[in-house]
Amino acid sequence: MNWPAWSIDRVLIVFDAAAFLLIGIQAALFHYRQNFIRKTMWIPVVGAPVFFAAGLILAWYNAPWLRALFAVLMWLAVAEGLAGFYLHFRGVGVRVGGWALRNFLIGPPVVLPLMYAALGVLGLIAVYLKGE
């Protein structure tokens, strides 16, 4: 592999794919710990590996239709992350004591879905970045 010849958008897409794999593992562990009590908990667990695979395929085979598909998937990741933030924030609020600091410490991680959304934004930046 000739890494110095890779454009910045290609490197960002590979990084984004790897980050989705890692954050997907973390989401799977947290949601498994809660026994997947809501069906929506499966969304990031299933979505992250799809984003990972799409990113790696795009990094090695840069077809215009793949870039368009990856862009759609990244918009989906942003939407998933924002919806997850809402659900996690609401989940903290329904705990005894409401939005007390201790509930943010022991309740659903509020920042993790925002990181998921941020990875989607990073993917969008990489797709729309014109690096040669």
Image (spheres, rainbow, N blue to C red):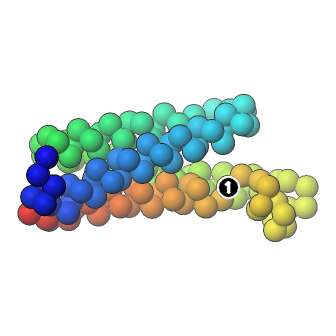
Residue 84, x across and y down, in percent: 59, 51
Q: Residue at x 53, y 36 (%)?
A: 45
Residue 127 visible: no
Q: Is 75 left or right of 33, judged from the image as shown?
A: left
Task: Determine the secondary structure under disc 1.
Answer: loop
Residue 98, x across and y down, in percent: 85, 61
In the rendered image, which quarter is residue 103 located in? bottom right
Is 15 rendered above or below residue 8? above
Q: Is 96 left or right of 15, judged from the image as shown?
A: right
Residue 39 visible: yes
In the rendered image, which quarter is residue 42 located in? top right
Is 108 rendered above or below residue 36? below
Density class for disc 1 (Cα within 10 Å; few <14, some 14-19, many ≥20) is some
Q: Camera-side residue: 99 or 55? A: 55
Tell me the quarter of the image containing the C terminus. bottom left
Which residue was labeled with disc 1? Answer: 109
Residue closest to the far right: 96
Residue 53, x across and y down, in percent: 32, 37
Q: Is 35 left or right of 53, judged from the image as shown?
A: right
The number of callouts visible is 1
Residue 107, x across and y down, in percent: 77, 53
Q: Residue at x 16, y 55 (%)?
A: 3
Amino acid identity at mark 1: Pro
Q: Residue at x 66, y 51 (%)?
A: 87
Q: Residue at x 42, y 57 (%)?
A: 119
